[in-house]
Image (spheres, grey):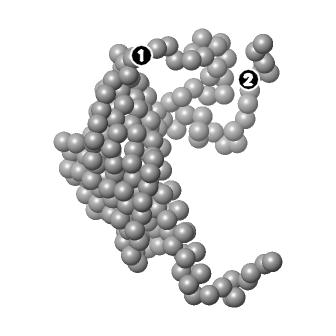
């Protein structure tokens, strides 16, 4: 059974518009995490309205200043970071949305220790000119701790980075288009 758009009720259309808005909002939040981990300034700034205010730890200010502050902090402290998004709630009222998104932050520090922390991003997003971006963010850090270090699995495989080495830049393999494999077939016994 197929349904044409013209036969959808106003209620169904409104629900579809809400689902699309929720996905666009979640995509914005995911772009923030990716941009932070890859030190991708343009992508990072695309997640905030230029006049946004962000309160994160000791920082309170705008997106450009946040990018400079946070990438400097992470560059001086960690080799790699993962800003993982977890539970997500989203209340949309017209062109304004309020979200609460749990996160798990994990990092490999410069001294090879591992740091994890958990908290929530509490955001107000606004749709301006058809685009959802963060207008206000409060970062609530709820816990933090160190995890025992161990060698990174498979770091000793000679060609493990032939498809691209992890990088905090656009040289990371996640930017490669089209993604290809140059490693030789090898099925361990």
Vertical placement of 71 versus 100: above or below? above
Residue at disc 1, secondary structure:
loop
> Would you identify the image quadrant in which residue 164 lies?
top right
- The mark lying in front, picked from 1 and 2, is 1
Q: Are marks 1 and 2 in contact (CB under 8 Å)?
A: no
> Would you identify the image quadrant in which residue 71 lies?
top left
Residue 16 percent coordinates (x, y) = 58, 75
Residue at 32% across / 56% down in the picture?
122
Residue at 73% across / 83% down in the picture?
4
Compute the Cα span from label 1 to label 2: 28 Å
Q: Does label 1 or label 2 sit earlier along the sequence? A: 1
Q: Which residue is mark 1?
A: 149
Residue 11 percent coordinates (x, y) = 56, 84
Vertical placement of 13 versus 187: above or below? below
Is any atom of residue 42 visible in this view? no
Residue at disc 2, secondary structure:
loop
Vertical placement of 75 versus 157: above or below? below
**How many marks overall?**
2
Residue at 45% across / 41% down in the picture?
84
Q: Quadrant of the N terminus?
A: bottom right
Left or right? Give the position of 174 relative to 45. right
Instruction: Mark 1: give few (<14), some (14-19) or many (20+) Cα within 10 Å.
Output: few
Q: Quadrant of the C terminus?
A: top right
Vertical placement of 86 versus 2: above or below? above
Is any atom of residue 85 visible in this view? yes
Instruction: Mark 2: give few (<14), some (14-19) or many (20+) Cα within 10 Å.
Output: few
Left or right? Give the position of 187 relative to 52. right
Residue 181 percent coordinates (x, y) = 73, 30
Residue 15 percent coordinates (x, y) = 55, 76
Kindly identify which numbered label has been placed on residue 183. Answer: 2
Left or right? Give the position of 110 relative to 20. left
Kindly identify which numbered label has been placed on residue 25. Answer: none
């Amino acid at each position: 059974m197929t349904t044409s758009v013209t036969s959808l009720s106003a209620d169904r259309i409104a629900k579809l518009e809400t689902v699309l808005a929720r996905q666009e909002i979640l995509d914005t939040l995911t772009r923030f995490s990716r941009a932070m981990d890859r030190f991708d300034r343009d992508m990072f700034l695309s997640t905030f309205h230029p006049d946004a205010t962000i309160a994160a730890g000791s920082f309170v200010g705008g997106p450009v200043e946040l990018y400079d502050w946070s990438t400097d902090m992470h560059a001086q402290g960690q080799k790699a970071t993962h800003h993982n998004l977890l539970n997500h709630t989203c209340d949309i009222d017209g062109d304004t949305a309020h979200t609460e998104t749990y996160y798990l932050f994990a990092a490999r520090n410069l001294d090879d220790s591992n740091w994890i922390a958990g908290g929530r991003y509490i955001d107000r997003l606004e749709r301006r000119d058809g685009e959802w971006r963060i207008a206000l963010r409060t970062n609530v850090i709820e816990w933090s701790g160190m995890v025992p270090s161990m060698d990174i699995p498979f770091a000793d495989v000679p060609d493990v980075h032939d498809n691209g080495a992890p990088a905090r830049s656009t040289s990371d393999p996640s930017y490669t288009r089209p993604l290809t494999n140059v490693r030789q077939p090898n099925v361990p016994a």
